[in-house]
Image (cartoon, rainbow, N blue to C red):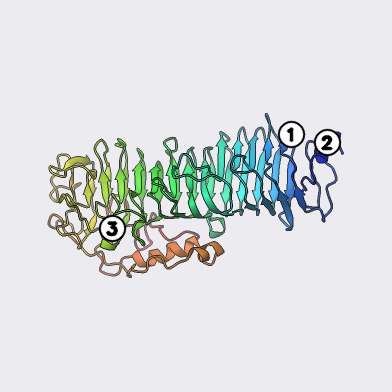
Amino acid sequence: MPSFTRSILSQLAVLACAACGGDYWLGGAQGTGPTASDDLHELTEDVVLSGDQNYEAGSANRSGCRIVGHGHSIRSKGTWTGHVSIRGCELTGLGSAETEAISLTTHGAGYTTIEDSRFDASGTIHVASYDATTVSFRNNVILPSSSVTLDPSFDATIPVFRADGDSEAPKLFQGNRIYRSTSWFRSPAWLIGGDSDRESNILIGLRVGFALDASRLVLRGNYVHNLPFPDSGDESTLTVLYSANDVLAEHNVLRHGTWVIRGFGGELRYNAILDADNAAWLEQPFENSKVHHNLFFMCEPPRGSDGVYAGIELVNARAKGIELFNNTLDGGGPAMQMWNSAVSVVDGCFLDSLRSNAIFGFPLERNDHGEASIRPGITERIDPPAKRLGYADYNLFFNPDAGAPRNYALAVANHTLRTDAGFALHDARSGGPVDQQLEPGLAASNADCFPFSDDDIKSGSVTVSRMLAAWRAVYTPRAGSPLIGAGDPADARNNPIGAIGDGTQANDRFGMFGR
């Protein structure tokens, strides 16, 4: 055994094992590891990796590995080109609120693999990937006992998982159970989730959510339930920062938050987005974003607020290339307190296209009589309608709880409402009166719209695919529905209005996750 390895081992009560009973190495030379009885590894100081040193613990084929950190961490130093592999381990007390549990900056062809492991009372897991390095963080559990600091402010909350670096190599974050704080991705080319339920990440807890701040990020097939945090006003299940303009987010179930989604750049499709608590389901789609075939709805009234500002809100001078099409927006009736509007376009913003959307269940009640399904910002007047729409057609409205339902309080330049193609001429039903209201004719009632428990979702007995399929069954148009085949034909033959059709259109994929 090399002398530097003996020196490190002499500073630790027990260090690490590869395969918890097989070989391990710290450095280029390989040695003979502890026996199978040496499955408990207690750290008396940090494990510090440099050069091409490696750290291995546990095995994918056996259990029993435990790493007890006593506040110490596993970290790299300098230009480190080795690898870390932790599989099937229980990690307790690794790091603290002030110290990252794992802090690795990898260069060259190094890699980090953390799989099938469980973190208890530990700090942040931080991986930074450069050159061609890769990361696999799969099938892990981060318990609510995590020691990361939460705060009423998003910016002051410490993420439980953080990814940095500029490596363009594929990286995986799959099958994890996260029960406290955010997971923040600031490096490119991560697949977050996957194509099946076994790859779904389940996030349930205080301030849980994803924060995306890089290119080539894919968020697919995940469940996120943000639980209320005291005195917080900026919670979301998904936060997309300004540098991320090519996100693909699909087949996710996203629940609760001041904004369920705060900021978005890229393509948002086939998601269930529900239970906004104050501001909106979707706040601030960025330039050139495409939002389509999503189901937006309310199963619970807002937490701690007197209503929701808007279903989807364009703010902060977002004014180019934004399209909302083939979405279903269900306000849930008066009990769900979606008082203001389904879609709001504030001063300085512009919505290029609003087409083939089913918009219903909004009570549209305001004390200034400025209620309308599509309107300007919450503090703005509605007459004369501001010209902030580039195209608005083939939509359906049904808001019978509104005292005097108005569909549009925004206008398309040089177009006359319900007279000109491109400004509501083909809204359901085509050629009908201004502010026409048509019952959408869905397959079933959504009165019990979230009949699932978080405990069953944690256990895996309720999956993302099951939830999405259940909502597809409810929101499918029944025979004779005015939604069927009434959407914009430029998008698809027999295109429906709303997120769900008869399954023959290429984009009709809501509720098809895992199939």
Q: Secondary structure at mark 3?
A: loop
Q: Is residue 124 left or right of residue 67?
A: left
Instruction: Assess disc 2: are there few (<14), some (14-19) or many (≥20) residues with their C-alpha within 10 Å of its C-alpha.
Output: few
User: Of helix, strand and loop, which one carries label 1?
Assistant: loop
Q: CA distance from mark 1 to mark 3?
A: 58 Å
Amino acid at circle 2: Ser
Q: Which residue in the rendered view is the most extreme toward the front? A: 231
Name the element at disc 2: helix
- Taking depth in this image into account, of 282 and 215 the one nearest to the observer is 282
Q: Which residue is mark 2?
A: 7
Q: What residue is shown at x 71% (from left), y 49% (from top)?
A: 68
Return the mark for residue 52. 1
Circle 3 residue: 337
> Dot 3, how many residues are within 10 Å of its Cα: few (below 14), some (14-19), or many (20+)?
many
Percent across and percent down for residue 220 are 49, 51
Q: Report how far apart the C-alphas of labels 3 and 2 lie in the structure.
A: 65 Å
Asked whether disc 3 touches disc 2, contact meaning CB atoms under 8 Å apart, the reply is no
| Numbered label attached to residue 456 | none
Q: Nearer the viewer, residue 496 or 80?
A: 80
Residue under the point 87% across and 39% down: 1
